[in-house]
Every structure is written in C-alpha cells, then in structure tokens.
C-alpha cells in the first residue's frame, strides 16, 4: 500500500480478507520498508495464553485488540493504571466534564469517528463552541491588551508587518505561511532531512528576534520547552495535518458526557481480559527466533504470548528492561524521545465576573498564570461551565515544583490581582500534571532538531515485540495518529 491509500484506513482495504489468507503464526516474512530484516516467526500459543498480548489500554491498544479479535485471535491487555484510556482523561465529576487530555476530533478524523460509532457513544459538535465569545485578552505583566492595543504598544517586539499578531498565534501562523514542505506526508522521508532544524532557527529566518521568539513561543510552547527544543520539520508536518483537517470541514466532535466514556465502552466490548494495575518492568525474548515473549510486572505477575504489542510511551518504556535490548536509532528514540510538559487546573466561578468587568473571559498571559481557557460544555453552549488554566513547557514544570495546592492558590491569587471582579468568586478544583502522570511522564511526543531520522526505525518490530502508539505514527497526530498506528501494527502482526 502506498501512503495515501494507507491513510484511508485498513478497514477500507479489505483487512479481513487479507487476514483470512495470512494466519498469525505465518512463516518468517519481510516487513515492507524494513529492508531485508525479517520479522521473527512466532512460537505456537500455549494453553491459556493469548495469541497476542498488548501492553497499554490507551486508544491504540484498545483499537489493536478489537481489530485482532475481529480476525479471530485471542488477545489480552495489561495496563499499569487503574483505568483505561491512556491520554484520554476526563474529569467526570466536574461540570462540563473537562478534558485533561484528548479534547476533540475534526471531521477528517475518519478512524476516530468510526471508533466512536462502534463504541456506541453520543457525539456532539463542539467546534462552534470554541468560536463563541470574544477572543482572549493578552496580558503582558499587569497590563491587558486587545489586538489593536497590542499592535500599537511600544514594547511589542514583533517586526512591523507582524505587530497585529498576538503572541499565542504568531509562531503557528509563520509555520503555516512559510512552510518549506511541498508534501507534508513526506516529512519523515530522507529527502526532507535538510529541513530538520530547530524551530528557533526557522523563526529567525522569518525575521523574529530572540525576544520575539521567546514571547511568541517559549512562554507557551506547543511542543517542547522552547523553540530550540523542537524540530521545525515536525512543526511543519503538524501544520500540514491541521490544514488537512480544516479542509475536511469546520466541525469538531467530542463525546457527550466526556471522551473517557469512549475508551471505557471500547474496553467493555472486548472478549479478552483487560488487566489493570499491572505495571510492566521487563520484557524478555529467548535466543530462538521462534520463542514467545514474556512480560514481567512489578507485582510479580508474569505473562507470555507468541507476540506482544507494546503501546507504552517511550517516556516509560525507557524504564523497562528489554532483553535482548533494542539497538540503533530505535534505541536512541526510546531513550531520548521528548514528551510535552502540560499541567492544568480546572476552575469554576460563582458568578459571571466577565459580565461585571466587561472583559473577555479568556486570558493569555506572559507570567505564572499561563492561559485561562473558558469551557462551554453545558447543555447551553453559551454557558461557561468552568475554566481550564493551562501551563506548558517550563511553566508546567514550575507549577509541578510548587505542588498542586500551592499552584492552585497561586493561580487564583494571580487572576484576582489582574481582575479584581473575580475576588472571592473562583474555586480551584482539580490539578492535573501530565509530567507527574507516571505512566506517561508528559503528554504527547515531540521530536527535537535532528531526530526526525528516528521515524524510519521507531516502530520496527524487535523479534516478536511490536510497537504502536501515537509516537510511532507518520500520517496523523493525536488520537488519529494512535489509531493509525493500531492499523499498522495489526497488519504487521497478522502477516
């Protein structure tokens, strides 16, 4: 299959027919795109064992399990957390069911929308809710700015032609306008390697000073901790994916009642076991290419299967002993792949203070407050059900060092200082840090300059150990990328 056909999803290409003629325990077969290195022949399943053991009950693990069961295979999942969903994380006990991880899917999320339909959850359109109300105000220090005021502000460090751009939008705007990729699908191809420079260098080439780059990116980085920390090539790939989603349509969808309900429904549909609270500490394979894979857990439990699919983020897999060890670029990726620091606090307001001070409810700040994002997930889209206050990169690390209670107190105090109308009206409920989430140690993955070369080997099977997860996807990001990786790894396993 070429890349464009693969992007349509394996289901449309007759996966069932292929699986029927290609049993799981097939003879050694060369993996497409992997040169001459064969995928090892699996051992026969022993009594009581699954055909395939999956590590991780996030969306990629759940989807892979479902697809393998459709092919008649016996599958089991083990998960370190006490819940399913991975980076789908909803505060089900808070108004509006705020999302701490995966938020919504666009009309182009063909895989995601299909999974939601299969799960039987009710989807609601939320894209229009993002566009309700005035744009957030910009706060530099203690001063609030509208777009027009910011453009005229003497302290605005942006080039004259870009002074009307708000700090939170400038970097993405320049990547979108000045992208060097002729085909964003080719971002990981060797021909694109010369473009793998830092985002800082890319923004410098667009005429931004160091001060402008710091304000436009480093304070609230989309990827990484600063513009030096992320590949411009990966940013251009992400831009291409976003543009493809926009071209598919303006709508965005989320699960009514919380996205976590989708993962929970998928888990209930599976025939095989989903074992929670089983933290993986070691994965071993014998010297014989036909041997099974054994997974050792922290609680002393041991599981074996002819084949294992690992969907664990590399940020946690690097702490798992693998024998024989990985090598080459794949080993580098496991050891070094970055994961985005994001910390969030969910706030509610006793009264609509924004109606009292006549200011926009949303806030983008250059200080310890981070970004204040109004949530409109009630039955009435006009109603603000709460606020997500978000820190990214270094600010997220700072909040984590303060601790949850101190960070919540700091956030409330800072909002009250900037907006006196909020005094005594804010309630800080939940603190959630992806960096402190021990089975992720960061949110989504990102690549630093010079690391895009890893993508050629990042998901290569190691004997009978296979890899999936959003960090291995090359044609989509987020939840759609995780589902893309499930299709790929299932094709690898059954062939």
Image: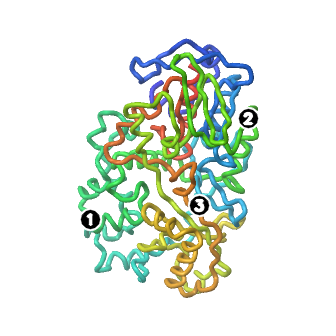
248 relative to 378 in the view: left or right: left
The picture quadrant where one finds residue 32 is top left
Tell me the residue at 64%/45% (across/down): 80
Tell me the residue at 46%/67% (across/down): 398
**Which residue was labeled with disc 3?**
128
190 relative to 340 in the view: left or right: left
Tell me the residue at 56%/45% (across/down): 479
Q: Do labels 3 and 2 touch, CB within 8 Å?
A: no
Q: Is residue 153 above or below residue 246?
A: below
The picture quadrant where one finds residue 66 is top right
**Which residue was labeled with disc 1?**
210
Q: Do labels 2 and 1 touch, CB within 8 Å?
A: no
400 relative to 142 in the view: left or right: right
Q: Nearer the viewer, residue 61 or 387?
A: 61
**Which residue was labeled with disc 2?**
273
Marks 1 and 3 sit apart, C-alpha to C-alpha, by 36 Å
The image position of residue 207, as x and y in percent, is: 23, 61
Q: Secondary structure at mark 2?
A: loop
Mark before the other along the chain sequence, 2 or 1: 1
The image position of residue 390, as x and y in percent, is: 52, 66
- Residue 325 appears anywhere in the view: yes
Q: Secondary structure at mark 3?
A: helix
Indicate the quadrant containing the C terminus: top left, top right, bottom left or bottom right.
top right
Q: Nearer the viewer, mark 2 or mark 1?
A: 2
- Residue 252 numbered tag: none
Q: Residues within 10 Å of mark 1 (few under 14, many from 20)?
A: some
Tell me the residue at 64%/30% (across/down): 53
């Amino acid at each position: 299959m070429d890349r464009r056909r693969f992007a349509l999803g394996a289901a449309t290409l007759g996966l069932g027919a292929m699986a029927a003629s290609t049993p799981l325990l097939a003879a050694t077969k060369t993996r497409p795109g992997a040169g001459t290195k064969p995928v090892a022949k699996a051992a026969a399943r022993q009594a009581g064992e699954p055909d395939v053991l999956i590590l991780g009950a996030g969306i990629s693990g759940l989807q892979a399990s479902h697809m393998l069961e459709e092919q008649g295979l016996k599958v089991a999942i083990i998960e370190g957390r006490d819940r399913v969903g991975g980076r789908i994380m909803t505060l089900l006990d808070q108004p509006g069911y705020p999302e701490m991880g995966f938020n919504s899917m666009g009309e182009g999320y063909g895989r995601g929308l299909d999974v939601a339909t299969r799960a039987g959850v009710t989807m609601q359109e939320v894209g229009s809710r993002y566009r309700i109300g005035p744009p957030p105000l910009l706060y530099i220090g203690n001063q609030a700015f509208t777009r027009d005021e910011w453009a005229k502000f003497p302290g605005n460090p942006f080039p004259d032609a870009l002074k009307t751009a708000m700090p939170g939008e400038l970097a993405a705007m320049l990547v979108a306008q000045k992208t060097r990729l002729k085909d964003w699908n080719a971002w990981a191809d060797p021909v694109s390697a010369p473009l793998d420079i830092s985002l800082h260098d890319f923004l410098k080439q667009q005429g931004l000073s160091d001060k402008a780059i710091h304000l436009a990116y480093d304070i609230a980085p989309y990827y990484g901790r600063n513009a030096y920390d992320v590949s411009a090539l990966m940013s251009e790939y992400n831009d291409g994916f976003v543009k493809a989603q926009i071209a598919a349509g303006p709508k965005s969808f989320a699960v009514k009642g919380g996205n976590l309900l989708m993962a929970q429904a998928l888990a209930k549909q599976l025939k095989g076991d989903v074992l929670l609270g089983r933290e993986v500490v070691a994965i071993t394979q014998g010297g014989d290419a036909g041997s099974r894979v054994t997974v050792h857990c922290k609680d002393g439990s041991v599981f074996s299967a002819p084949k294992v699919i690992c969907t664990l983020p590399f940020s946690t897999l690097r702490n798992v002993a693998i024998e024989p060890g990985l090598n080459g670029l794949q080993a580098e990726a496991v050891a070094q792949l970055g994961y985005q620091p994001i910390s969030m606090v969910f706030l509610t307001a006793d009264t609509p203070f924004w109606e009292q001070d006549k200011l926009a409810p949303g806030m983008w700040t250059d200080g310890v407050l981070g970004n204040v994002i109004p949530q409109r997930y009630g039955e009435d889209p006009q109603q603000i059900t709460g606020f997500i206050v978000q820190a990214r990169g270094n600010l997220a690390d700072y909040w984590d060092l303060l601790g949850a209670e101190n960070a919540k107190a700091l956030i409330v105090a800072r909002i009250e200082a900037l907006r006196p109308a909020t005094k005594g009206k804010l309630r800080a409920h939940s603190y959630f840090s992806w960096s402190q989430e021990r089975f992720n140690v960061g949110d989504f993955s990102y690549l630093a300059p010079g690391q895009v070369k890893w993508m050629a080997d990042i998901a290569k099977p190691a004997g009978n150990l296979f890899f999936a997860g959003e960090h291995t996807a090359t044609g989509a990001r987020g939840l759609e990328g995780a589902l893309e990786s499930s299709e790929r790894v299932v094709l690898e396993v059954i062939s």
